[in-house]
């Protein structure tokens, strides 16, 4: 179903709030409401951008297995949809995700967790995503919420965002990448301080200073700015975007020599694509490229 933002027929709270904010700024855009039914997330598309909104308001978007099942399902659908070029993942203005659902996991035991590889399915789909994912983080991003944001390729934060890893206060440690991704993002000393105390958090500007987030925006503009960036990415050649994402991610896995070799091979591979020919022809001809994502 297609609706313009000028319409008053929005039925979902996230779309209503987003529409009101855009109308106040005089911005109109075509929104497609995703027909897929979910209980804990909302999905929509704008052109070549898909937006996934966590929607457990009473639980501050606490992460649970059912929520991750829905997130993973939506991500897989959009990753395999050739009409989508990038994804925005967001929550509410109060909380991106305030952590894991402790009620769900508190009575689990080691053997069951080990045999079922507990938490692995929380991270697998984002790790497999070929298309870029932009996290738009308002409010709390604590524990699993911070880890979820760090699984994304770009993080934008609202001015009131708070990032932290308080698991030590519960007698455990981060289990969905916090010890690894946070250390890579902010450095060993700050990561140790945050994880070992469980009480040292980063506000939005601190997170930007440490390099955890790329940019900070007023809360009411955050999602719109994330969508703008996602649209810029989605307008580029899809094959080159995927290759660029692969190359950057390999910087965390390879030594410099191997990483440079990997990058060079992907660069050379772009010359087998239609979009490389179109991009360079357009540049030489001083015109805008018309990428076909091949």
Image (tube, rainbow, N blue to C red):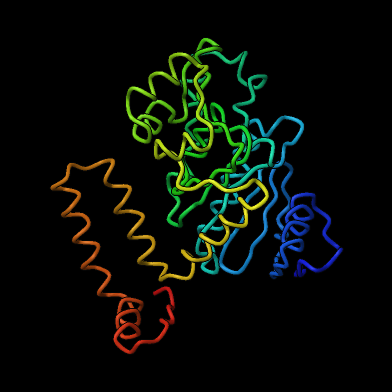
User: In the drawing, does residue 261 fall left or right of residue 156?
Assistant: left
What residue do we see at 69% from left, 36% from top?
A: 94
Residue drawn where x is 21% and y is 43% of the image: 254
The count of marks equals 0
**Horizontal side, residue 178 vs residue 26: left or right:** left
Q: Locate residue 224, reporting x and y percent.
A: 62, 57
Which residue is outermost to the left? 257
Q: Is residue 195 above or below residue 84?
A: above
Q: Position of residue 93 (x, y in %)?
A: 68, 41
Q: Quadrant of residue 227?
A: bottom right
Q: Position of residue 59 (x, y in %)?
A: 72, 29
Question: Relative to 18, is 289 above or below?
Answer: below
Q: Name, please, the residue furthest toward the top.
A: 171
**Which of the 4 image quadrants contains residue 21?**
bottom right
Looking at the picture, tell me which residue is in the foreground, 242 or 217.
Answer: 217
Task: State the residue in front, 38 or 159.
Answer: 159
Residue drawn at x 50%, y 38% is 205
Q: Is residue 6 above or below residue 191?
A: below
Query: Residue 208's spot in the image, x, y percent?
Result: 45, 40
């Amino acid at each position: 179903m297609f609706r313009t933002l000028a319409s008053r027929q929005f039925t979902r709270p996230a779309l209503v709030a987003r529409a009101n904010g855009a109308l106040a700024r005089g911005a109109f855009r075509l929104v497609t409401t995703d027909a897929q039914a979910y209980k804990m997330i909302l999905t929509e598309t704008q052109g070549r951008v898909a937006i996934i909104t966590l929607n457990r308001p009473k639980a501050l978007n606490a992460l649970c297995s059912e929520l991750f099942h829905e997130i993973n399902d939506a991500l897989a659908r959009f990753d395999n949809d050739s009409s989508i070029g990038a994804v925005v993942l967001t929550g509410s203005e109060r909380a991106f995700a305030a952590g894991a659902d402790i009620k769900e996991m508190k009575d689990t035991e080691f053997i069951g967790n080990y045999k079922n590889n507990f938490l692995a399915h929380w991270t697998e789909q984002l790790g497999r995503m070929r298309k870029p994912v932009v996290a738009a983080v308002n409010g709390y991003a604590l524990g699993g919420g911070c880890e979820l944001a760090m699984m994304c390729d770009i993080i934008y934060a609202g001015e009131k965002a708070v990032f932290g890893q308080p698991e030590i206060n519960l007698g455990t440690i981060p289990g969905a990448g916090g010890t690894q991704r946070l250390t890579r993002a902010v450095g060993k000393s700050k990561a140790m301080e945050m994880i070992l105390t469980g009480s040292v958090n980063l506000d939005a500007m601190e997170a930007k200073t440490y390099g955890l987030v790329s940019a900070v925006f007023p809360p009411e503009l955050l999602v719109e700015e994330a969508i703008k960036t996602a649209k810029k990415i989605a307008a580029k050649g899809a094959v080159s975007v995927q290759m660029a994402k692969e190359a950057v991610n390999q910087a965390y896995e390879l030594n410099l020599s191997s990483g440079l070799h990997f990058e060079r091979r992907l660069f050379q591979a772009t010359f087998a694509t239609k979009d490389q020919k179109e991009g360079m022809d357009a540049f030489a001809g001083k015109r805008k490229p018309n990428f076909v994502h091949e």
